[in-house]
Image (cartoon, grey):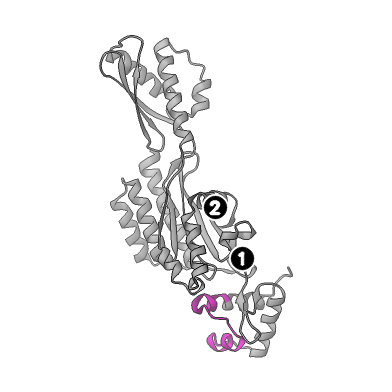
Amino acid sequence: MNELTERQRFLLSLVIHEYVRSAMPVGSKHVVDEFNLDMSSATVRNEMATLTDMGYLRQPHLSAGRVPTEDGYRLFVSNIVQETDLPDSTRRTISHQFYQMRQDVEGWTRLAASVLAHQSRAASMVTAPLPEESRFKHIELIAARGRQVLMVLVLMGGEILQRFITLDEPVSQEQLSSVADRFNDLYTGINIDDMSSDPTPLNALEQDFQRAVLGEMASSESMISGDIVLDGLTNVLAEPEFSAPGEARRALRVLEEKPLLNEILTKTVLHGSAQGGVQVLIGGEGIYDALSQVSIVLARYGTPGLATGTLGVLGPMRMPYGRTISIVRFLSSLLSDLVNDTIVE
C-alpha cells in the first residue's frame, strides 16, 4: 500500500476515534464539525475517498460515511495509536487489590480477569502462571512406616508434588535427610536434562531417589496446561456489532472453545503484532476465521524460563485500543512483579 501523508494519517485517526465512540459510519462534514478542523468538507471527503481506495476505510452504503477496515485498524494500532494512561488513582486501587491477595495465585487470575473486563469494557481472559519446564527447587524425604518414604518435591514455580516410595529395605531418617540435603545442594534450579546428565557420583540410595525425582518432574512437564479464566462476556454481547444472534453466537463460540482459545493465546503472544510488548490480533489476521469480527489484545507476564502466564482482552474491532493496550500492559507488569516476588523466589 502507498505511504500515507501526515494529513491522511491524522484524518484516519479521527475517523477511527469517532467510529469507536459512536459505532456509526463517519461522514466528512461530521469530522469537520466535530473536531473543528481548519479544512473544508470537500477536502476531507477527497482524503477519505483516497483512504478508501487505499483499503484503510470502507463505505457500507453509497449514502453512508466511512468505517475503518482491518488494515485501517492495523495501521492505527502499529503507527498512530496513542496509549491512554490509566489515572494514578486507578493504578493505586488495582495494585492494592492485588497486594491484598499476593499469596493467592488463583485469586490473581480471577481478579485480573475482573479488572481487565471492567477497565476495557470487553471480555477478558487470563491463565495462571505456569512453569515452562520443570525445574528442581527443594526436596524433603520423610520416613513413614517400614520401608515407605514420603517424598515431597517442590518445583520452581511453586508446584508441590508428593509421592510415597517403597524401598528395598528400611532406611533411617538421618540417611534420608542426608540424601535430601545433597540433592538440594546439587540440583536447585536445574531442569530434567541437567539432572540426568549431571556427572556427580551417586550411591544406590541416591540413584533410587534421583529416578523418582526425574519421574515426577517428567510427569509434571507433560501435564503443564492452564485453565483460562474468563470474565466480561456480557460486555461483548452488548456491543452493536453482536446484536444479531448469529454474530453473538460466533463471539460466544470463540470464548467457549477452550482448545482454540488456548492455541490463539499461545501463538499470538509468541508471534503476533507487537505494540511495546503487547500483542494485537485484528480480525483473525487471516488465520482464524472465528475471529473475523473481533480483536484481541494480549501480553505475557511472569519470568520467562521459570513461570509465565497470559492475559488479554477480546472485543469488537471497534475497541478503544489506546486504553485497552494500556490496561493490558499495566496488569502484565503488575502480575510479573507478583510472580517474581512470590513464586520465583
Q: Which residue is mark 2?
A: 264
Q: Which mark is residue 129?
A: none
Dot 1: within a 10 Å radius of its alpha carbon, few (fewer than 14), some, or many (20 or more) residues?
A: many
- The location of residue 222, given as percent across then percent down, is 48, 34
Horizontally, is 167 left or right of 329 in the view?
left
Dot 2: within a 10 Å radius of its alpha carbon, few (fewer than 14), some, or many (20 or more) residues?
A: many
Q: Amino acid at mark 1?
A: Arg
Q: Earlier in the sequence, mark 2 or mark 1?
A: 1
Say if the magenta span includes residue 33.
yes
Q: Which mark is residue 74?
A: 1
Mark yes or no: residue 312 visible: no
**Span highlighted in magenta in the image:** 16-36
Horizontally, is 72 left or right of 117 in the view?
right
Q: Quadrant of the C terminus?
A: top left
* As drawn, 295 above or below 219: below
Question: At 61% across and 86% down in the image, what residue appears?
Answer: 28
Q: Amino acid at mark 2?
A: Ile
Query: To which quarter of the image does residue 276 belong?
Result: bottom right
- The location of residue 191, given as percent across then percent down, is 49, 29
Prevailing secondary structure class for the magenta stretch in the rendered image: helix
Distance between the Cα atoms at labels 2 and 1?
18 Å
